[in-house]
Amino acid sequence: MLLGALLAAPAACCVASVVGVIRSGGMFAPGSRGYRPGSPREEEAFAATRRDVHPRDVGAVEVAWAGVIRAFEVDDLADRVELRFVLEHRFFDWIEDYSVQRERYFVSPRGEGLFAARWPMPREARAEVRDHVHVGDLLLVYGPASRTGGRLAIDPARYVRLVVPGLWRDDVIDYGRDGEPARTLRTPMPFDHTQRAPLRALSSEEIARAALAPSPR
């Protein structure tokens, strides 16, 4: 599976522990660890990008951002398939939590707006996109960020990782940049049902303004 290699692997054995407050800036709760890339390609992208640069800071730098997919298009080109995403940025502390709950990644319901990303893939991965990529999924995107007019984009992405549903949630800790207030929203428990933060309704015009144009065919 070409696209399957991008998926965050299911949790193995969770360590029973008390869930503490997970804050931006590297605070580790019992049973947690720093984020570990899931493949050699992601390791390379992880090492080359900055996780302390957020959408309001964008300059000539490579970044790593988490975003919820709000829209996407699949373009069939002569030599590849390109995915064009519109994502809603979410703060992510880059901590993996192995506690009593199934979810491993706790992103914040807070973020800094929409951004776009372009990800080229081999043509044979086209069918797998339909099976695995959905609006509302969480994507980790690595690459050079730039702003042209009002459009913020990572184009092209160096790497993307799709976090499968059930391994992330955004209803536990509300946090932002380092030094900004953070608060606990709820304590996850075993077999607790994930409650996603409601997504703001987007108009077609907002999506069009944020989206990247397709590459020439």
Image (cartoon, helix red, strand yellow):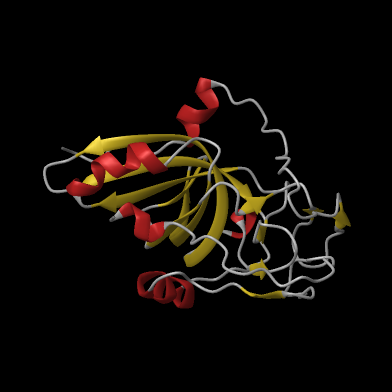
Q: Which residue is drawn at 34% across and 51% down?
A: 119
Q: Classify residue 23 as left or right of residue 55.
A: right
Instruction: Tell me: residue 23, above or below residue 129.
Output: below
| Residue 91 appears in view | yes
Instruction: Tell me: residue 82, above or below residue 157.
Output: above
Q: Classify residue 14 as left or right of residue 44.
A: right
| Front position in the image: 79 or 147 | 79
Q: Determine the image quadrant of residue 82.
A: top left
Q: Which residue is drawn at 39% across and 61% down?
A: 159
Q: Position of residue 109 (x, y in %)?
A: 73, 46
Q: Classify residue 162 as left or right of residue 90.
A: left
| Front position in the image: 47 or 162 | 162
Q: Position of residue 93 (x, y in %)?
A: 68, 65
Q: Position of residue 65 (x, y in %)?
A: 55, 58
Q: Position of residue 18 (x, y in %)?
A: 85, 69
Q: Which residue is drawn at 86% across and 50% down?
A: 186
| Farthest residue, direction left | 78
Looking at the rendering, in which quadrant would you find the C terminus?
A: top left
Looking at the rendering, in which quadrant would you find the N terminus?
A: bottom left
